[in-house]
Image (cartoon, grey):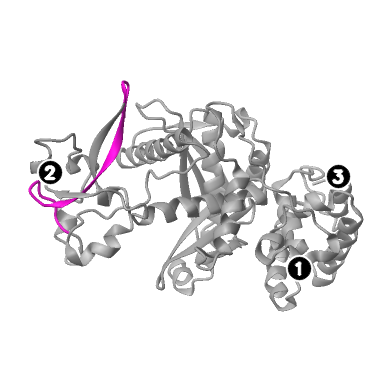
Amino acid sequence: MKKNVVKVVSNYLRTDMGEISGNSIILQNIFRYSLVFLKKNREAVVEYFKILQEQFSELLALMSSKEIFQTTSKKITTLQENLRKSLVRDQHANEILSHSFFLFDFGIGEIKELSLLVSKNNKTPVENEHKGSRKFALDHFEHLYNRFHNSQKPIFAHRFIELRSKYIPAFGTEFNVRESYIESGFGRDYYENNARIISTIEAFERYCNIYDRKKLPTIKSSFQALEKTENVIDPRKLILHSYKETNNEKYALGVYKSDKEIEWVKGKEITKKGESEVFVPKSSIVFGERRENEQKKNNFVFETSNGMAIGGSAEEAKLYGLYELIERDAFLCAWYSESSTKELELDDYDLEEFQELKMILKSKNQELKIFDITSEVGIPTVWAMIVDYSDEAPMKIYNAAASNVNIKKAIENSLFKVCTTFPIYETMLSSNSKVMAKKK
């Protein structure tokens, strides 16, 4: 956001922290909700007004005692009009509006009067500071989205901005697996454009691995027979369901036995000496298979997308798949062992936006905490938590975790997750009369 445009809003807003900076997450969200007037379907604007009013109400709680303005519909309308005039006059309007959600949901045709520039996809490899050049850059996934979304048989059903994420932009991309089954990818980032593309990347990731779309060469055999001639992973090492679970009357899968014939595919085992081929249970890598084969009792584990990753290169995809496994292993070990963890100080890290957000949450009797839960693997792993100390809080605690060789990045990623998801569930639960009745 450019300062001359930010000034339109910042003249109205003063908080105990001083004038809101141009790169403030909160201010970006105000812009996001204020620009809905450009959507031609006026009927939908009413809902956005409600959310916008909530945003201003929260900011008012942080303002000095002097009432600078009231959050009435008239004032909001005036603010939107001022924004519209400034954006049209501003030479950087293209850049500003490129981060605004209405472009993604309703298309460039909705705002022809602004003559937005559409940048072409840059197909030059992007340098990665750790691994050299990537084969695909972030924008390539946007190109792929447009390609598959506009095809005769579109993959993606819907892409949306999650308005209940009050502090940090969050997007979702949905795709139809079957008529009654929808999967989604989610993205979070400081900037809406990145959050939107990240949600599409995660949707691609899940689309690719929900079923065996590549028709991988498959063999059917038991572990007992296959281990005699091939390098094979013992399914029991993949952590199977307990005896209590398999004996539950609602358990719909099969029970594993070493002589049970199952489908196997070849994978690559990464070792210090390189990569070697190894047979793995097909149901452990294609998580949608269980839905297709439940009645056959062919699968014996309720698999998910855990450990799946997509990247700009094969190396990056492998790395982030490992990050996800390391993160969840460390979190669950810390949770179930109830071991002591080291609390980290957010102020010790250069994460200004989250330091600002921590102050905002504090004003609402909520606290943002981060803990170091790095396991014996040695890859920094961080557990982030938001606690609401209010007696009638619909959402008391929410947790998230992340791993990265750079601990600052692990902190940032865990905070992205917890700070976007907490307000979503907070809103959902507060509107659930049964939940709130139990609170009382």
**3 or 2: mark nearer the eye:** 2
Most extreme residue toward the top is 273
Most extreme residue toward the bottom is 43
**Is residue 397 visible in the rendered structure shown here?**
no
Q: Nearer the viewer, residue 384 or 378?
A: 378
Q: Is residue 291 left or right of residue 12?
A: left
Q: Position of residue 317 (x, y in %)?
A: 45, 38
Q: Position of residue 379 (x, y in %)?
A: 43, 28
Residue type at numbered disc 1: Glu
Mark pair 3, 2: CA separation: 65 Å
Q: Which residue is mark 2?
A: 223
The magenta span reads: 254-274
Query: Magenta includes 89?
Result: no
Q: Earlier in the sequence, mark 2 or mark 1?
A: 1
Q: Residues within 10 Å of mark 1 (few under 14, many from 20)?
A: few
Q: Nearer the viewer, residue 363 or 216?
A: 216
**Is residue 53 visible in the rendered structure shown here?**
yes
Q: Residues within 10 Å of mark 2 (few under 14, many from 20)?
A: many
Query: Magenta includes 273?
Result: yes
Q: Residues within 10 Å of mark 3 (few under 14, many from 20)?
A: few
Q: Position of residue 57 (x, y in %)?
A: 72, 61
Q: Which residue is mark 3?
A: 3
Q: Which residue is mark 1?
A: 110
